Image (spheres, coloured by chain):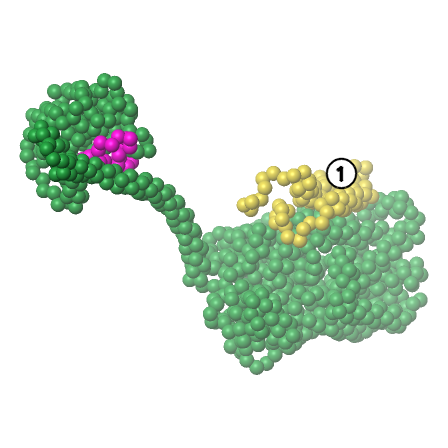
Chain colours: A green, B yellow
């Protein structure tokens, strides 16, 4: 028989080995060596195995011995969760990494607006839910020692020696956790020592269980088929599982897998690379499958071989012992020891982080208002509070273990604990998938779920008459019939576990959803919600801090106290370099404050980090005004850009207009040049004639009278031509300057046209046939008739001069256009070239450049006159010849009644 | 939600990867469905010969387990290295 002392010696050696491994891993991690191992997906997968605790190692066999295959549901749930990693785990890990989440309490608090109240609630619930579980681990180790002792010589006293063993185990675990769990503060610097030790223990427990299983199947039962026959022949031989428990427990274990603080710690917080999930998605189910493969055979053979009344929870130990296999039993003991210790270490680490970040630190900060920048090293305070939390939690577990007396079946506590932490599920999943989830909703949901869990599961577990009276069990709380702890709402007959899980989670989720629907989140909550839910779209960060108030130096001092001087200086220097500044102090931009808060959150949790920066920056980071300012800013930018667009449109329009104007100006300039040469020509031709003929008359002797008269006549005609030209110029200049006075008279349009046609035909030698419609011309005018006549004459003369038709015809059409009267002069010529149309009303513009007769002033004068008279003259398109329209406004054209 | 600029249709490789992701998403539903089939097995009030023997149940549950592990491993391999920065659709 293996002596107890030998076992203890082996155990101590094993513990020593673990310390060494952890120590080496920690050193390698600090030096940056062995990254291939420390950051490998294999280690990640193995570290997930802390899901399999002492409860699993020993309890699963006991569970199977009592209820057959039902034990397997505890593994099916996690297998499904990790096989479906793409749905939830990937998202959780991404959020955990981008927001530097330190624990599940931190995740929930951070999601709901960095609410510390929520963090405290989650922390307390986690401590209440997990402490019994830690006690359970202590119990499993001491009980397994007792089994050995009983097999040895029976000197091991259940009461005194067991509690002493429990005490020393607790001390050892606390020591290990403090040593390797609080070595560094920043959770994002992984706990390499702990993770490696956990991975080693994972291998040990797997090998141990498989060794016992193989021994049972091939050593005792004699092969697989024999084993299966023995299983069928045993009391567990047929499928007798309650369907509701099968489904309910699978769901519960899946929920607990996501929500257990220790699972969150290894799965999300210690995750180094999102892609490790990809490997774990098949490797971890494989691990779970192997862990549960031999459970039923061990249970069946144990029930067969061991005397009735032996505790089935420890068949894994007692079966090899009964067969005289002490080595195997020792290995098995180490497996159970590993399962228990690794769970306690990680669970304590996770809980202590939560307690210190969400309970101790806020109280510390509250007690020292404005204290983060003052004297005292916050870093040490955080570490100290975390160490004390570790001691406190393990101590609590030990006290619970002592108090409970180690009697109840292991599996029961396990399930109660699962159901307790599963209450986080609605708030967590709602938080990462639903932007509408609010803080109040989460608080109410957690509160409802937790109270129901306490009432229907935790308190009844102590048995009738212990905490809840027998009367309460039978007649309901305070005698209210539908408040019976195991038959809520008067529905009896449901399995108690399924009953508690179903009602607590259902009402938890329902109240969470309903309250979320009717409440309104505050701004920070909405920002965080959007970031958590849309973590894959934008890993951008919440904008929040006001810039001007924060002092870089204060921030630096505070950061040094949390991260340590060297890290803080490195961080600040990096930031300063990024901002393009020399030295250590970056500008406290909102971006920088954001990153700093994340860094600090990695050490002390989101809510505390937020509060600490808040102390320096001053007050709440995000007010509605800030949000409005941000919104305003973006609205302004939107408006600005649309203004820019409009402006650029306007600019291109203006540019086009300018180009047109420029073209016109260029043409006008050409025209002016042409006109100047023209006008000098026009002036010089008569002047030359006048000079030449006057010189002839002066110098030539003996001119005949007839010749003198002829020459004098030529001089006279040329002088008249000059005068007319000068008159025109003068006229135009007067009109343009607005100095003209109108001589308003009344008269008939037809008379005016008669006179104009007669005058034009008299002055111009070329014949033109004029077609008119006398009836339509019967319009009474009240305007300056002389000026209007001048316009008509000009237009008719133009037609006479420029109409190139063989038999020129001019139609004069009068028509009523609304209230105005239009007089159209349309000839059968070739029209005006398109290019000339927009300049032909300008001064000096001459359409037919080859024709030297006019000075190009006629149309300009017409337009000026018509403008003065309040009408207009325009070129008329599409007439088949050259057409002009004179438009007389109504006031000047009174239709003859 | 598609980001602006994400193409509506993908080239062959990208398309295959998306379908692998779909398969990963669906696998868990398949697993849950298969493991809930025992709910349909008779439990009470059946004649001795009619009840499902535990050995069969054991083989079924563990068979499904093996299958899930194998398919999951195959899909994880087929998916290849997912880029560090992906959105929900796996697009960069």
Location of residue A44 in the rendering, given as x and y in whole percent from the top left corner:
74, 58
Q: Which residues are magenta?
A: A838-863
Circle 1 SS class: loop
Q: Residue at x 50, y 66 (%)?
A: A545
Residue A821 is left or right of residue A105, and the answer is left
Q: Residue at x 66, y 42 (%)?
A: B14
Mark 1 neighbour density, 10 Å: few (under 14) some (14–19) many (20 or more): few
The location of residue B43, given as percent across then percent down, is: 74, 42
Q: Is residue A71 left or right of residue A10?
A: left
Q: Is residue A839 located in the magenta-colored stretch of the structure?
A: yes
Quarter occupied by residue A685: top left
Question: Is residue A470 positioned above or below A68 on the image?
Answer: below
Is residue A838 visible in the rendered structure shown here?
Answer: yes
Q: Is residue A892 above or below residue A356?
A: above
Q: Is residue A222 magenta?
A: no
Q: Position of residue A399 (x, y in %)?
A: 70, 72
Count of marks overlaid on the render: 1
Residue A149, located in which quarter of the rendered image? bottom right
- Which residue matches tag 1? B46
Q: Quadrant of the C terminus of chain A?
A: top left
Whether A20 is drawn above or below A228: the answer is: below
Q: Residue drawn 47% across and 71% down?
A: A549
């Amino acid at each position: 028989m293996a002596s107890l002392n030998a076992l203890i010696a082996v155990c101590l050696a094993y513990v020593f080995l673990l310390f060494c491994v952890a120590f080496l891993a920690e050193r390698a991690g600090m030096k940056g060596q062995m990254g291939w191992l420390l950051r490998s997906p294999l280690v990640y997968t193995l570290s997930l195995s802390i899901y399999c605790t002492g409860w699993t190692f020993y309890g699963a066999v006991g569970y199977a011995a009592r209820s057959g295959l039902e034990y397997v549901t505890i593994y099916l749930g996690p297998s499904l969760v990790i096989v479906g990693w793409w749905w939830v785990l990937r998202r959780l890990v991404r959020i955990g990494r981008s927001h530097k989440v330190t624990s599940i309490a931190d995740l929930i608090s951070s999601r709901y607006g960095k609410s510390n109240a929520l963090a405290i609630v989650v922390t307390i619930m986690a401590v209440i839910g997990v402490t019994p579980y830690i006690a359970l681990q202590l119990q499993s180790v001491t009980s397994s020692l007792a089994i050995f002792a009983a097999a040895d010589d029976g000197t091991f006293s259940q009461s005194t020696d067991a509690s002493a063993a429990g005490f020393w185990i607790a001390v050892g675990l606390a020591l290990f956790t403090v040593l390797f769990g609080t070595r560094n503060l920043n959770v994002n610097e992984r706990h390499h020592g702990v993770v490696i030790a956990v991975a080693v223990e994972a291998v040990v427990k797997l090998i141990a269980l498989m060794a016992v299983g193989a021994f049972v199947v091939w050593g005792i039962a004699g092969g697989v088929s024999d084993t299966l026959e023995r299983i069928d022949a045993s009391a567990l031989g047929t499928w007798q599982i309650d369907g509701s428990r099968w489904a309910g427990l699978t769901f519960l274990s899946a929920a607990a897998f996501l929500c257990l603080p220790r699972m969150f710690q290894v799965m999300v917080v210690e995750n180094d690379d999102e892609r490790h999930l990809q490997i774990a998605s098949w490797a971890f189910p494989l691990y779970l499958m192997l862990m549960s493969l031999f459970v039923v055979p061990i249970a069946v053979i144990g029930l067969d071989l061991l005397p009735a009344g032996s505790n089935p929870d420890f068949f894994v130990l007692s079966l090899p012992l009964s067969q005289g296999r002490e080595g195997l039993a020792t290995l098995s003991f180490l497996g159970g020891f590993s399962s228990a210790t690794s769970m306690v270490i990680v669970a304590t680490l996770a809980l202590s982080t939560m307690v210190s970040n969400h309970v101790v630190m806020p109280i510390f900060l509250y007690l020292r208002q404005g204290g983060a920048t003052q004297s005292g090293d916050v870093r040490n305070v955080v570490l100290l509070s975390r160490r004390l939390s570790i001691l406190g939690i393990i101590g609590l577990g030990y006290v619970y273990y002592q108090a409970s007396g180690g009697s109840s079946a292991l599996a029961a506590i396990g399930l109660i604990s699962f159901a307790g932490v599963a209450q986080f599920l609605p708030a967590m999943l709602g938080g990462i998938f639903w932007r509408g989830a609010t803080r109040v909703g989460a608080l109410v949901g957690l509160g409802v779920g937790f109270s129901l869990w306490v009432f229907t599961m935790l308190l009844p577990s102590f048995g009738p008459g212990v905490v809840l009276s027998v009367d309460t069990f039978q007649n309901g709380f305070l005698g209210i019939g539908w408040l019976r702890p195991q038959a809520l709402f008067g529905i009896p007959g449901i399995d108690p576990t399924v009953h508690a899980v179903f009602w607590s989670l259902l009402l938890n989720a329902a109240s969470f959803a309903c309250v979320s629907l009717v409440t309104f989140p505050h701004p920070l909550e909405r920002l965080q919600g959007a970031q958590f839910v849309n973590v894959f779209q934008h890993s951008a960060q919440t904008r929040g801090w006001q810039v001007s108030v924060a002092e870089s130096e204060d921030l630096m001092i505070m950061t040094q106290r949390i991260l340590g001087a060297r890290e803080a200086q490195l961080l600040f220097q990096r930031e300063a370099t990024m901002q393009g500044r020399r030295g250590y102090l970056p500008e406290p931009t909102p971006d920088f404050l954001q990153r700093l808060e994340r860094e600090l959150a990695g050490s002390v949790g989101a809510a505390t980090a937020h509060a600490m920066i808040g102390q320096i920056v001053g007050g709440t980071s995000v007010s509605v005004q800030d949000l409005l300012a941000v919104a305003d800013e973006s609205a302004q930018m939107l408006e600005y850009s649309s203004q820019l667009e409009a402006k650029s449109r306007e600019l291109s329009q203006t540019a086009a207009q300018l180009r047109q104007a420029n073209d016109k100006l260029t043409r006008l300039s050409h025209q002016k040049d042409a006109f100047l040469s023209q006008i000098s020509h026009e002036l010089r031709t008569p002047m030359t004639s006048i000079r030449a003929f006057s010189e002839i008359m002066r110098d030539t002797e003996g001119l005949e009278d007839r010749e003198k008269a002829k020459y004098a006549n030529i001089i006279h005609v040329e002088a008249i031509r000059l005068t007319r030209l000068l008159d025109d110029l003068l006229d135009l200049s007067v009109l343009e300057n607005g100095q003209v006075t109108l001589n308003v008279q009344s008269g008939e349009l037809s008379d005016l046209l008669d006179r104009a046609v007669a005058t034009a035909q008299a002055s111009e030698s070329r014949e033109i046939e004029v077609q008119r419609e006398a009836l339509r011309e019967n319009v009474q005018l009240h305007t300056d008739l002389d000026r209007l006549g001048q316009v008509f004459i000009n237009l008719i003369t133009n037609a006479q001069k420029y109409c190139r038709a063989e038999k020129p015809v001019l139609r004069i059409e009068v028509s009523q256009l609304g209230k105005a009267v239009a007089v159209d002069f349309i000839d059968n010529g070739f029209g005006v070239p398109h290019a000339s149309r927009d300049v032909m009303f300008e001064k000096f513009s001459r359409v037919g450049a080859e024709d030297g007769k006019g000075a190009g002033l006629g149309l300009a004068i017409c337009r000026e006159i018509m403008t003065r008279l309040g009408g207009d003259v325009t070129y008329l398109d599409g007439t088949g010849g050259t057409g002009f329209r004179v438009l007389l406004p109504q006031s000047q054209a009174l239709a003859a009644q | 939600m598609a980001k602006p600029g994400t193409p509506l249709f993908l080239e062959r490789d990208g398309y295959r990867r998306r379908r692998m992701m779909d398969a990963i998403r669906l696998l868990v539903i398949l697993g849950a469905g298969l493991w809930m089939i025992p709910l349909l097995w008779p439990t009470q009030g059946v004649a001795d010969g009619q009840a499902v023997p535990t050995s069969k149940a054991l083989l079924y549950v563990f068979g499904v387990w093996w299958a899930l592990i194998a398919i999951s491993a195959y899909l994880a391999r087929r998916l290849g290295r997912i880029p560090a920065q992906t959105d929900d659709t796996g697009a960069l």
